[in-house]
Image: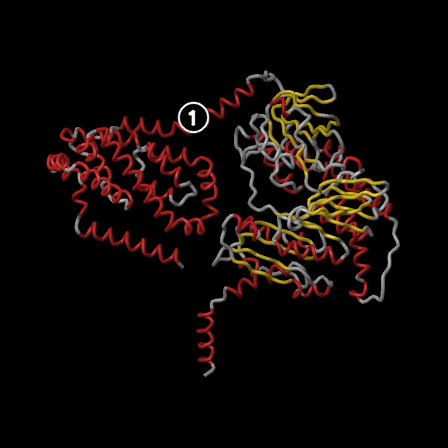
Amino acid sequence: MKSKFSKIIILLTIAALMVVFFAFDLGQYLTFDYLKSRQLALEAYHADHKLMTMAVYMAVYILVAALSLPGAAVMTLAGGAIFGLWLGLLLVSFASTIGATLAFLVARFLLKDYVQDKFGDRLKAINEGIEKDGAFYLFTLRLVPIFPFFVINLVMGLTPIRVGVFYVVSQIGMLAGTAVYVNAGTQLAKIDSLSGILSPGLIFSFVLLGIFPLIAKKIIAVIKAKKIMAKYTRPKKFDYNLVVIGAGAAGLVTSLIAATVRAKVALIEKHKMGGDCLNTGCVPSKSLIRSAKILSYVKRAKEFGFESGNIQFDFAKVMERVQKVIQKIEPHDSVERYSKLGVECISGDAKITSPYTVEVNGKTLTTKKIVVASGARPFVPPIPGLEKVTYLTSDNVWEIRELPQRLVVLGGGPIGCELTQTFCRLGSTVTQVEMMPQIMGREDTDVAGLIQEKLESEGVKVLTGHRAKEVKIEKDTKTLVCDYNGKDVYVEFDVILVAVGRAANISGFGLEELGVELTPRKTISANELLQTNVPTIYCAGDVVGPYQFTHVAGHQAWYASVNALFGGIKSFKVDYKAVPWATYTDPEVARVGLNEIDAKEKNIAYELTRYDIDDLDRAIADSEDHGYIKVLTKPGTDKILGVTIVGAHAGDIISEYVFAVKQGLGLNKILGTIHIYPTMAEANKYAAGEWKKAHAPEKILKWLGKYHAWTRG
């Protein structure tokens, strides 16, 4: 409310000043003819009242610039005519920059939020460019006199550029043009008009000077790349168009795309085709989760009308089923299949020996481009004593055939939560240890709270805020020592499963020797084309991030492959506009876009619409009537900012919202779409309906009620 009132006051003040300016024809005092006619009088007044003249001059100049009034050029000439070159240049430089910054701040205060809210999507690329290279762009504009400075002030106020950067760059950037005008002012008697000050040649010189910073930046990038490449001899002929390292999701898709467009491609894998997803990640985990869920249904037998239920099972056979599922899917990612598709599959350890060569099995392959898709591995924290026990990770847990009796799961992320619930359902006594205040740290507090309650209701002991300090072994007893608010907590266990995250595979195959840059997160540093600082090397998947999901790896693979093969003709910036993910606990948690935590951290205003799935017919029929859908929308509109779904089949239901976010569709479109009855997907329509009810046009409905009453007589 205060902000709105302040905006009104500023608008009224500006309007009043504008009215005074034009009503009293004050513009006549800011013309070239008036300045020439009053030059001697102004010089005489300055001689008698130096400080007063400087103060009044600067105040008027600042006001003219701040209000974007015509006359700044004449004021600059006056600075040279009255004060001389150096003092005039000093006064004009500060006055013009202060005035420009005030105009910038006014535009930002009055219009930025409205413009960004209204056109944020279309301005995203511009905003990102300004955040990255705003100083270069502004400097260019300031150096080129053909761009009206008042327009630059107002437009820049609508962008994310920082005030300090705007001020400093403006002062430096306007200095050259200011000097030309101030110097012309010192020769005012010899000038016939403003148009005579800037010749076409001078303007062209300013243009060249203005674009120089941007050109220089590109030149520096080219020089850096050439410096890297200069150490190596470029082969006259290449064995391959593309060599891909790693046959996980990213590597498979990258090589498939290359083969599809008839490029000659080699795919190198040192372990198993299919990578983590097939062998140690998505496929085995979802297979085991499914088996455990069948057990959970049996325990809920009475909910489905049965007196009781009981299943006898052998844990080893359950784990063998997991391997059978992997074997059934293996042909999709096999050497045979990809060979038929035109990919040359090579088993062995790859070593990048130059930007053009990869060594494998003692043979050197020459290639125009390389894509690194080496994936990631489970991160094991340096906990004293952990090395003394045979700990499990998501890599080797699939090898066990004996059910752990007392299991400690380190980590409360997606993998940790999924395996915690799964082993609990299979019969292990599970303690989950998470150092952060909540499990599922990337999700909203209410979402994490619901999952924790579910885990605890099934028998899991969840210890949040507990930091693992040490593993102790005394006789036959294994104990995890945790720090909880400065006190030691002891957890005895038989087996410990480490699931605290994943680390990118970045070492051991030549990246260090070539000087490929890394991020602070120890992933490969790449630009928007997924190209590294070594121009011939691209990357995709977990090794680059920022999301470590199979579907994102496949998404990135398209960009890496196409940019590597066709970047010289046309390149594409990787798009993360609508990245969805799901955690396959029971209930599932699925998300796309912002949640409440993200929106608050980024200071993005939102409206929250919630639909509780306990009201959905299909959920009730399936005895899965729990969970909810949370939709964040742009205030006053149906534009979707993000969606979180907690409930049965959330990972499937979210797809409609992923499409909507990607295509810029709002809740009205979802509400107007026919959904099959009875399905869980109907929840999406009902969530849209909740939004619609909250935005019902009450005044119009009130008048409609009166109209219908009138028609009844």
Give the residue displayed 67% in from the left and 54% down from the top.
Answer: 650
Tell whether 24 sits left or right of 511: left
Residue 45 appears in the picture as rendered: yes
Could you say whether the residue bearing mark 1 is in a helix, strand or loop?
A: helix
Q: What residue is pinned by disc 1?
A: 216
- Which quarter of the figure has residue 471? top right
- Which quarter of the figure has residue 209? top left
18 to 335, vertically: above or below: below
The percent position of residue 446, horizontal first and vertical second, equals: 62, 57
Q: Which residue is at the far bottom?
A: 713
**Closer-to-camera residue (658/405):** 405
Look at the image and name its color scheme. secondary structure
**Split into 4 quadrants, where in the image is the N terminus?**
bottom left
Tell whether 10 sits left or right of 472: left
The percent position of residue 560, horizontal first and vertical second, equals: 60, 33
The percent position of residue 670, horizontal first and vertical second, equals: 57, 58
Tell whether 531 sits left or right of 377: left
**Closer-to-camera residue (480/396):** 480
The percent position of residue 641, horizontal first and vertical second, equals: 54, 52
Give the residue displayed 39% in from the left and 57% down from the top.
Answer: 2
444 to 219, vertically: above or below: below
Amino acid of disc 1: Ala
445 to 196, vertically: above or below: below
Q: Which residue is at the far front?
A: 487
The local crowd at label 1, few if under 14, some if 14 to 19, many if 20 or more residues have their Cα within 10 Å, is: few
Give the residue displayed 35% in from the left and 55% down from the top.
Answer: 6
Give the residue displayed 70% in from the left and 37% down from the top.
Answer: 381
**Split into 4 quadrants, where in the image is the C terminus?**
bottom left
